Image (cartoon, helix red, strand yellow):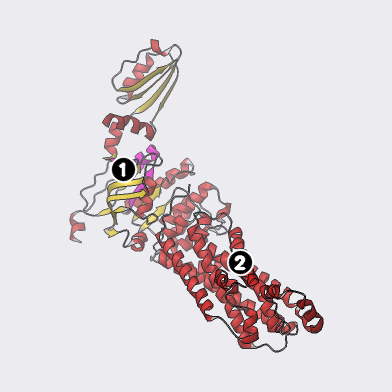
Amino acid sequence: MNVYKKELRFMKSTMLLWVVALGLVMVMFTALYPAFSNDVETSKRLLEQFPPQIRHMLGLSLSVFFTYLGFYAYIFSYITLAGGVMAMNMGLVMLAREQQAKTTDFLLTKPVTRTKLFGAKLAAVVSALVGVWSVYVLMAYGAAKLFGAGTIDSEKYLVLNGVFLLLLIWFMALGMLVSQLLHKIKSVPALSLSFVFGLFVVGLISALIGEEKMRFLSPFKYVVYTDYVANGTIDVPYVWLAVASSVAMIVAAYVVYVRRDVKAVV
Amino acid sequence: MREIVLFQTLRKNVRGSTILESMKAAIKTTKLTKRYGKDIGIEDVDLEVHEGEVFGFIGPNGAGKSTTIRTLLGLIKPTSGRALIFGKDITLYGPEVREDIGYLPSEVFYYDNMRVKDLLEYSASFYDKPKKQMQTRMYELAELLNLDLNKKIDDLSYGNKKKVGIVQGLLHSPKLIILDEPTGGLDPLMQQTFFDLLRAENKRGATILFSSHILSEVQKLCDRIAIIKDGRIVKIESMKDLQHNSYLRCELELTAPASKQSLDLPGIYSLERTGKRITFLYRGDINLLTQALAKLQLHDVHLREPELEEIFMHYYQKDA
């Protein structure tokens, strides 16, 4: 479809930028792995210095940290943070692109329903996210092998990265909804950085104080990666929460998009 | 089909045309209303634009012209009332209706970093018309308007961006052309070309809805006009009647104090004297006016067509 292709083209440079950014973050962290894995005893003593709550908050698990997957579970938080910003950016811009370029009149007076437009744009952003995510997974695997990861439990690795994709969709949905609730977006990065970092900090706090009731507030803590790597346990209700809230946000964004009056640009 | 054969619109030319009763309305609104909370955007707007005519839509800024047009185009949802375009309800058949509409907005903005050609081809891709035909038309129009298709839109002047808007609105040969204050930014020569273009479109059967606050433009092109004020239609007249009722605004600067000068002439309204200036409105034979002016000791004379605002003030104060 013409809109789908055009939207992808609009996102081309963003996608490239984020592939590079995510790649750099991941390589930077992965390069640290040999330092920890080579001298497990010293590293263990170092980690034991941190109080258990802090370790829990940061995702530093003594039991699994020195396997590659455990290490990955630790750096994973930061990867998802970067990814969250990317996804929310894309979500914000998806529907607000016309508002920023003041081309709303151009697009919405075409013989196409807003539903179709929404669908095409959604498909384009999801495609872009899946594209970036796929490249990231390949890069991460490559880096892991490069820095001496040894054998990696592929099922667990894929599940972890699958959670990453879910988080990307969640933040995209949040971006979409926020873009429709605000009358004007002054700065896309400012919005996404505040929301994503804000939610990240909320997640850290909820882990620090160990308050289970707070956990649902931050998608960053829906899955406790170290627990999963250690025991294979995932709190499935939280996964469903992520899915359901993403769908709810997308639907809400859709309803506002279809109903809104487009006033003249003064 | 029989109705079309029986009731064909006869057109001679734009001015002095005779439009016979046309059964088909290009646009028909019934009590179209848009309220923003307590504020009225438009209220009970009843309009009927016949197929094939050039219909002017005039009013001061904020009167509701843009609101009406944006409602017809589906950008704004009406609070109440109905609008049919070529017989189809705009709320139920939005996309179908817009297939046959070419919209030329007052302010043109386009995606950054696109070439003119890319934007126009993107625009064309939405219409269910033969691609080749639209492409040919695109090149024709660009040539006519002197628009470089390979330039980046960011690099264009305001006037050239306006041209992109014109081509974008016309390349799919729409049955209904809606223009919202279209000539701002165009130089006089280009304005002329643009009007010729509109006349040509009208000749091939397109209906034109022309919204403007510039009376002279409306006078050049329109068969009938609707005047909107404070969200309500106050008058629908044919151009002939409007011209018959329009007048000149006159400002005289005299060499001697104005109170001493007399201007005895029928057809003078709203006469004001201040210091050495006399201002008034005149409706009638221009020769009688010049003869009367010749009797005065004048320093300077300004005669101009009234602003639409002034027409309202005079015309509707009378009715009130």
Q: Does the stretch in magenta take in B41?
A: no
Helix, strand or loop at label 2? It is helix
Q: Could you tell whether B264 is left or right of A67 in the image?
A: left
Badge 1 crowding class, 10 Å Cα cut-off, few under 14, some 14 to 19, many 20 or more, is: many
Q: CA distance from mark 2 to mark 1?
A: 53 Å
- Label for residue A255? none
Amino acid at circle 2: Val
User: In percent of the image, x 64 and y 76: which residue is there?
Assistant: A136
B294 in relation to A177, above or below: above
Helix, strand or loop at label 1? It is strand
Q: Chain of mark 1?
A: B
Amino acid at circle 1: Arg
Q: Could you tell whether A51 is left or right of B209 in the image?
A: right
Quarter where residue A56 is shown: bottom right
User: In percent of the image, x 68 and y 83: which residue is there?
Assistant: A69
Find residue B211 and report its horizontal and vertical position in percent: 37, 45
Q: Chain of mark 2?
A: A
Residue ID for mark 1: B232
Judge by depth and name the residue closer to the eye, B81 or A60: A60
Magenta extent? B206-234
Find residue A250 and report its horizontal and vertical position in percent: 47, 68
Q: Could you tell whether A123 is left or right of A204 in the image?
A: left
Residue ID for mark 2: A202
B256 in relation to B179, above or below: above
Find residue A139 and report its horizontal and vertical position in percent: 67, 79
